[in-house]
Image: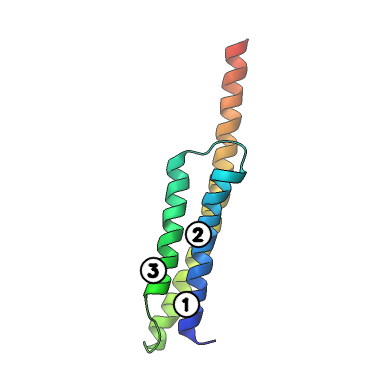
Amino acid sequence: MTEGALVNVLGMVAGTVWMSAALYFQLIRPERVHPGFVSALFLIGVALMLGSSAVTITGRPSFVETLAIAGNGLFILIGLGAWYTLERYADLQALKDHTNETRDTH
């Protein structure tokens, strides 16, 4: 696999991670998550996919290709971290809402 193809594949994987997080929070997770978070995750995923496929890396110096590979790898890790952090935040918000509802009923 050439480095240009690897950049495109990693960009698609990075975009898929971010878009999958958005779809998970919107369609699968039973508790609500603020729509702004879902929109941001989805738009970042789309941008990563389109940006990766739009930039032709083939024929560039190997340093540029290596930076593009590292950047896409970094976005995969940041996407997984954002997914985990938002999951924890949403759980905390749901617990807080549940506690407030319990106080209001007593």
What residue is at 40 percent from the left and 62 percent from the top? 47
Q: How is the image coloured?
A: rainbow
The disc, 2 or 3, on the residue closer to the chain's N-terminal end is: 3
Residue 1 lies left or right of residue 37; in this view the side is right
Residue 32 position within the rendered picture, expressed as x and y whole percent measured from the top left? 55, 36
Q: Residues within 10 Å of mark 3 (few under 14, many from 20)?
A: some
90, above or below 71, in the image: above
Q: Amino acid at mark 1?
A: Val
The residue beneath circle 1 is 7
Residue 76 position within the rendered picture, expressed as x and y whole percent measured from the top left? 52, 64
Q: Amino acid at mark 2?
A: Ile
Q: Nearer the viewer, residue 23 or 7?
A: 23
Q: Amino acid at mark 3?
A: Gly
Q: Closer to the camera: disc 2 or disc 3?
A: 3
Q: What quarter of the picture does the N terminus occupy?
A: bottom right
Q: Closer to the camera: disc 1 or disc 3?
A: 3
Secondary element type, mark 1: helix
Q: What quarter of the picture does the C terminus occupy?
A: top right
Q: Residues within 10 Å of mark 2 (few under 14, many from 20)?
A: some
The residue beneath circle 2 is 78
Secondary element type, mark 3: helix
CB atoms of marks 1 and 3 within 8 Å: no
The residue beneath circle 3 is 51
Residue 2 position within the rendered picture, expressed as x and y whole percent measured from the top left? 50, 87
99, above or below 24, in the image: above
Q: CA distance from mark 2 to mark 3?
A: 17 Å
Q: Quadrant of residue 80?
A: bottom right
